[in-house]
Amino acid sequence: MNGRNGTIALGVVLVLLLGSALAELIPTPDFSNHPIPTAAVPGTTSAAREYLDVALLAVALVLATYWAHRTRSRRNLFLLSLASLFWFGFVRQGCICPIGATQNVAMAVWQPGYVIPLSAVIFFVLPLLVAAFFGRTFCAAVCPLGAVQEVTAVRSVRVPRWLDHVLSLIPFVYLGAAVIFAATGTAMLICRYDPFVALFRWNGNANMVIFGFSMLALGLFVGRPYCRFLCPYGAILGVLSKFARWHVRIPPDRCINCRLCEDVCPYGAIDPPSSAPSPTDVARGRRQLAIVLLASPLVVLCFAALGTQLGGPLSKLDPEVQLAEQIRREELGLTKITTDASEAFRAARRPVAELYAAAVSQRERFDRLAVALGIWVGLVVAVKLISLSMRSRQSDYEPNRNGCVSCGRCYWYCPNEQIRLGLIQTPEDLVKLQ
């Protein structure tokens, strides 16, 4: 025992001597002037800025509606679109926006644990309410995505009518897919594949930057390609605008059928006057409508059957399902390459059976939602066929309530509008200036 005590005492002496030597070599740091850190409390700047954006959105919608319907000022609408592009685009970097808020609403409906910000709800609902009463004035001069395309719509060509009808179905399919992926927590498709966010933020995925510039280049020849053939929120606005109580009119009073508005519209959103159909045409139209109505349930069923085959492929895009597949391949020895996700999973010591159960549950959700997506697409196609079979008679050139974005380009070229403004005396004067 005495030998052991002596060894311990010798060790203590050596440690003290070593500590004294190190103290001379390494000076003791001086913390006398070092400020004591305090706990950081999140401020209210972010929330205040969000509601500032809400207020600016409301003001911009009021101005766009007033200038589109009341003063019919193409100039003011264009200036407002530049201001919206600057603030909602480059300053706020495309977030928050009503288009992306569609996914937040879907998550709030389908995921009980998700709490949607009130500002996102307002951003989503407010333009819809305006469209339901006044048409797509949000698209006219408030949406930054539409504004950046409006600037580049210099020399647009007319898309063939049949192709325009086919491409106009894509936004509804995109809308259904975006809702499914948001509802399952898989991905925010609309935000991820927004072609202009990378331009607004001056950084981003190289592929999305290329996609954005490609859209702008295409916009030189095809008016607003994203708005017309991809934007899911625009699809909703178009449906509501079709039933709007008030909508923009091309002439302030009587149309003289000069066709100038039809030639200048880069979006193909002006319908020409139609002649009275003959009795033969009426009978043929009724038969066509009857066939389409009878075939509509079959169309929906066919797309629903197609949806039953999409659950598996769509679920493979879900991170939980992807992780389960990776872990299964590693356990079966089918791959020796691990991923960051699989390594993090094993480091967390999460039970593999729990992961597999979650993946199976997510796969079952995709199976159900994929059928719903098929039914949705079938309904969209059926409604499109029915609308094409129903032709209403009109005597003047009128904006298509679904496709018109209330940009006001047609105002400047309308002879009656120029007479109202006192810029010309007769319609022939404007024709001479063209």
Image (cartoon, rainbow, N blue to C red):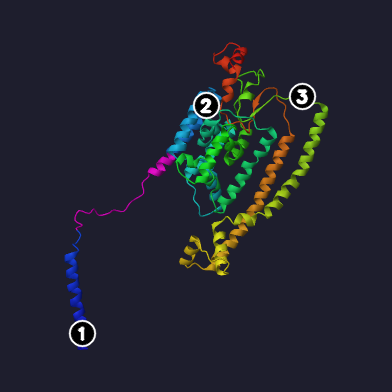
Give the amino acid type for the residue marked by disc 3 in the picture: Ala
Residue 357 spot, x, y in % from top left: 57, 65
Depicted 302 relative to depicted 404: above or below: below
- Foreground mark, 3 or 1? 1
Please state the extent of the stretch shown in magenta in the rendering: 30-51
Main secondary structure found in the magenta portion:
loop
For marks 3 and 2, the one nearer the N-term is 2
Magenta-colored stretch includes residue 40: yes
Q: Which mark is residue 276?
A: 3
Give the amino acid type for the residue marked by disc 2 in the picture: Tyr
Q: Is residue 7 something one can see in this rendering? A: yes
Residue 338 spot, x, y in % from top left: 51, 63
Magenta-colored stretch includes residue 175: no
Q: Secondary structure at mark 2?
A: helix
Label 1 vs label 2: CA separation?
Answer: 95 Å
Q: Residue at x 70, y 51 (%)?
A: 304
- Return the residue nearer the eye: 174 or 432: 432
Image marks 3 and 1: residues in contact by CB distance under 8 Å:
no
- Foreground mark, 3 or 2? 3
Label 3 vs label 2: CA separation?
Answer: 35 Å
Depicted 359 relative to depicted 92: above or below: below
To which residue does mark 2 refer? Answer: 66
Q: Secondary structure at mark 3?
A: loop
Q: Which mark is residue 5?
A: 1
Give the amino acid type for the residue marked by disc 1 in the picture: Asn
Q: Which residue is outermost to the bottom?
A: 1
- Return the residue nearer the eye: 81 or 402: 81
Residue 245 spot, x, y in % from top left: 61, 30
Horizontal side, residue 148 vs residue 366: left or right: left
